[in-house]
Amino acid sequence: MKKITFFIGALIMSNALNAQLFTDNFDSYSIGALGPQSATWTTWSGTEGGTEDGIVSTAQASSGTKSVYLNSTVANGGPQDCVLDFGALYNSGIFTYESKFYITSGKSAYFNIQAVAPIGTTWALNVNMANGGVTIDDGITPDLALGSYTPATWFTFRIEANLTLHVWEAFVNGTSIGVWQNGINSVRSIDLFPLQGSQYWVDDVMFDHQTYTLANLNAVAAGLNMGGNIATQVVNPTGVMVNGGTTAINSFDAVLNYNGTNYTQNITGQNIASIGSYTVNFPGVILAAGSNVATLTISNVNGTTDDVVTDDVISITVDPTVPALGKMVVGEEATGTWCQWCPRGAVYMDLFETDYADFWAGIAVHNGDPMTVTDYDAAIGTLVSGYPNALVDRGTEVDPSAMGTDFFSRLQTAPVAFIQNGATWDLGTRTLNVSISADFQTAATNAYKLACVLTEDNVTGTGSGYNQSNAYAGGASGVMGGYELLPSSVPAAQMSYDHVARVISPSFSGEPMSFPAIVNAGETHTLNMTFVLPATWDENEIHIIGMLIAPNGRIDNAGKATITEAVGNGFVVGNTASVTEINSDQLDATFRVFPNPAVSNTTVGINLTKESTVSMKFMDMAGKIIAARNYGSLNGSSTVELNTSDLKAGVYLIELTVNNEVMVKRLIVE
């Protein structure tokens, strides 16, 4: 089954809990499948005693001698799927879940809380644990809570959910790792599901529920999100105040204290009803490296002190990831307009761009629709098993919602070289000359390769090929960035596609002769590429993504720039990689240049599939026009002879325009 996953941090309040509705330390069971021995534990399908069951084991135990063991090595996780039904649906009061986890070093763990019955209808919470980090999302919003644990050591994980106020809090070993308003606010069961690479044990499981009574006047500090978790980021923190009383709240003060500075917002003129909430936006803050406490304090509620002062303050520990110097991570998403689950990929790609733009280069590689780049799609198709899926720096495929773990791991991996994109841009000829410069920080060889991808945002089109299939229509599959409000086939007129891969050059694996045999630290090597952009592409929405590909096929580092930014960086003359040929549906395979290389002359052969207006330019690599002609309306096969006897040896461009679509081929003159 498919689980939606993701990642980061906030905090809350809770009432004291005493009696527990359920506890289980597994010591009363025999070694083997759990389901047939228990009246409460079962499996996702309800079939017990088979491969879905958790295994009662004596290999590890937090208390007593036994625990439940789960692991997976298969691509989609499982087949284990161990479920504990809570016996009732809870959507008010305070619900608490707690258990102990032991996760093998280098392995991971995952579980989710189901919101309703039957199971598989709505996910209320996803908890991922890997590489010593705990990340939580509600299937709607990433960055809810972030914590840490010690691998190969038992630790306690706890959720306290005030379902009356919609406020949830998570704890690791008794320390709060986040407080948030959960998008799905009911609980019915928990599903322990090992993803690929998981190996973990669970012990001392408990859950409980108590009623919650509203006070008269009570403003609850119910959430604090710093707005990012990468050191040096400029972020816009948000705090959440929930009206936990019966009296409407008209005004309050919110103070964020971070890294020795207070940021105060005075909120007035409101009418926040009971159980309503208000999000406080704080001004830009630079995240500092190291561990710092951020505190949100709510006070002066309706001009007085509220009735419950114990829930007026929350604090979180902010310990942002310190990125490797000069590092940018590439995310390549396999997608298609025909794919009903691919809106999830679009939503998470946009979230990454919003949250991590300075460290993230997103590329949507389309399949089976009008935005497909054939060679790019074919190469990605060999690395993914389905759609949507994603590759982070061309690592192991993951669901787009689960890119966080790989992203932060790669972000901290020091690159072999820093990458900078330069460019020249001629609006008249629509010629984009790109320079990809690699500034080597360590020694390397020519086993490293450079490649360049152009992406375009806000791509629109007409026709059914631009309609987006949408499994989230109607909301039955949960909230997904607004797609739940759109029809099952979103018309092209309502769709705008971002991060669309337009071309990859010279190939998926990069330019074979990017570097000399031996590259020393401190050397900079540059590769030049030329693109002639079709008139249908918006140059203001283009991103140039230069990539350094390591010998093992992974992307070592990248650089990202708009055309304007790249021109500002300046074009650097280097080795010439190639001129990228952008094909048109007006031509069959016979837009040919022969002989190539040429000595004294060459022939351009054109075969049009329908009557079209045709013009051609012959240019040098600097974009200087050597010859140009408008041929008017043509159809069928035509040839044009070019005299090259007086030209210097080198690389030249033949630009063919058919009905305003531009194609380019490279001609080598010897």
Image (spheres, rainbow, N blue to C red):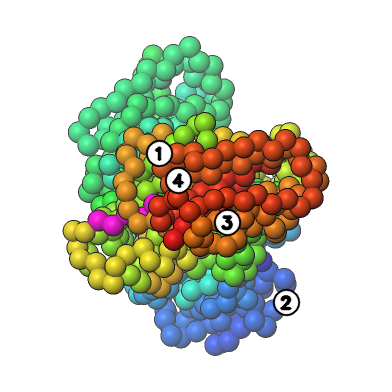
Label whose residue precedes the other's in the sequence (2 or 3) = 2
Question: Where is residue 639 drawn, in percent x and y?
Answer: 69, 52
Question: Where is residue 404 drawn, in percent x and y?
Answer: 45, 55
Considering every residue shown, the one lying at the far top of the view is: 269
C-alpha gap between disc 1 and disc 3: 28 Å
CB under 8 Å between callouts 3 and 4?
no
Please tell me how crowded label 2 is: few (under 14), some (14-19), or many (20+) other residues with Cα within 10 Å.
Answer: few
C-alpha gap between disc 2 and disc 3: 71 Å
Considering every residue shown, the one lying at the far bottom of the view is: 31
Please tell me how crowded label 1 is: few (under 14), some (14-19), or many (20+) other residues with Cα within 10 Å.
Answer: many
Question: Is residue 515 rendered to the left or right of residue 381?
Answer: left
Please report the residue visible at 65 percent of the width from the left and 49 percent of the height from the top.
Answer: 640
Question: Where is residue 362 drawn, in percent x and y?
Answer: 49, 49
Label whose residue precedes the other's in the sequence (3 or 4) = 3
Label whose residue precedes the other's in the sequence (1 or 3) = 1
Report the span colored magenta: 524-528
Amino acid on which the number 1 mark rests in the picture: Thr
Prevailing secondary structure class for the magenta stretch in the rendered image: strand
Residue under numbered circle 4? 620
Please report the residue visible at 31 percent of the width from the left and 22 percent of the height from the top.
Answer: 264
The residue mark sitting in front, 2 or 3, is: 3
C-alpha gap between disc 4 and disc 1: 14 Å
